[in-house]
Amino acid sequence: MKTVRPLVASLALAALMAIFAFVTAERLPADALLPTHWNASGEPDKFSDALTALLLPAFLAGGIALLLAVIPRIEPLQDKLEGSAPLLRAAWIGVMLLFVLIQLTIGLPAYGIDMPVNAIMLGIGLLLVMIGNALPKSRPGFFVGIRTPWAILDEDNWIATHRLGGKLMMLAGLAIVAVSLSPASAETIGIVVLAAVFAAALVPFAYSWWIWQNRTKTSD
């Protein structure tokens, strides 16, 4: 999988985000505090000085872009890597867009533009939908996908696990989007988000083991 162009584009985006951070910080008072963390209902609950808060998404975007560029080079199962390219691309694009959304949520109020309180939660939900849609297109690997030991060693197990995992992740993302748009309390939103994420993560793991266990019994 070629990663040079996506990496260059991502680092350019991170540089633009850094410029936005410095320009926006200049518009604010020296003692201004901006949010760096939000609770389940989208309300900020942690703050930092303006420049730190605005630069954090840019640094994270650049760092994760570098990590995603390295992964294809150190993947032991190189013969399977191209099959996972759609998933890696989807995750890469989705994460970059999420960091842009986070920075805009932090910085746009300085220009008199307030983002919806549920913007970041909506972004996370859409990211899960995007990744879930690409999950079934992946193939066994040590760095991409639902990496259970039974799926890595058995491509049929991997495919079945990722078909289920993709559906569950998309459902989890849609559930997060739906609850974020609802008038539910922060506690309810938190419960729905945790339940959706845990179900999308744990059920495919158990399913992968179940497939392996059944095949082991059959072979005996």
Image (cartoon, helix red, strand yellow):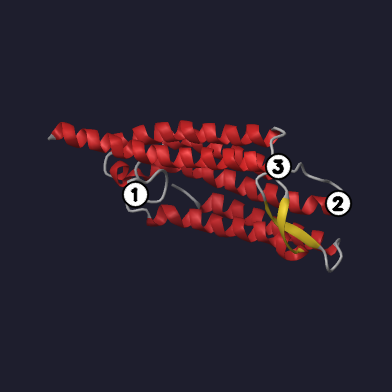
Foreground residue among 159 and 200: 200
Q: Residue at x 64, y 43 (%)?
A: 187
**How far from the left and from the top, in percent, is residue 52?**
71, 65
17 relative to 220 in the view: left or right: right
Q: Residue placed at 24% from the left, 37% from the top?
A: 213
State the residue position of label 3: 119
Q: Is residue 124 above or below residue 181?
A: below
- Mark 1 and mark 3: span between their CA atoms? 38 Å
Rounded to the nearest whole Å, what is the CA distance between mark 3 and mark 2?
17 Å
**In the structure shown, which secondary structural element does the residue marked by tag 2 occupy?**
helix
Q: In the picture shown, does residue 55 fall above or below 143? A: below
Q: Which residue is mark 2?
A: 111
Please name the amino acid that badge 2 sits on. Tyr
Viewer-side label of 3, 2: 3
Residue 30 in the image: above or below residue 129: below
Q: Is residue 90 visible?
A: no
Give the numbered dot on residue 78.
Answer: 1
Tag 3 secondary structure: helix
Dot in front, 1 or 2: 2
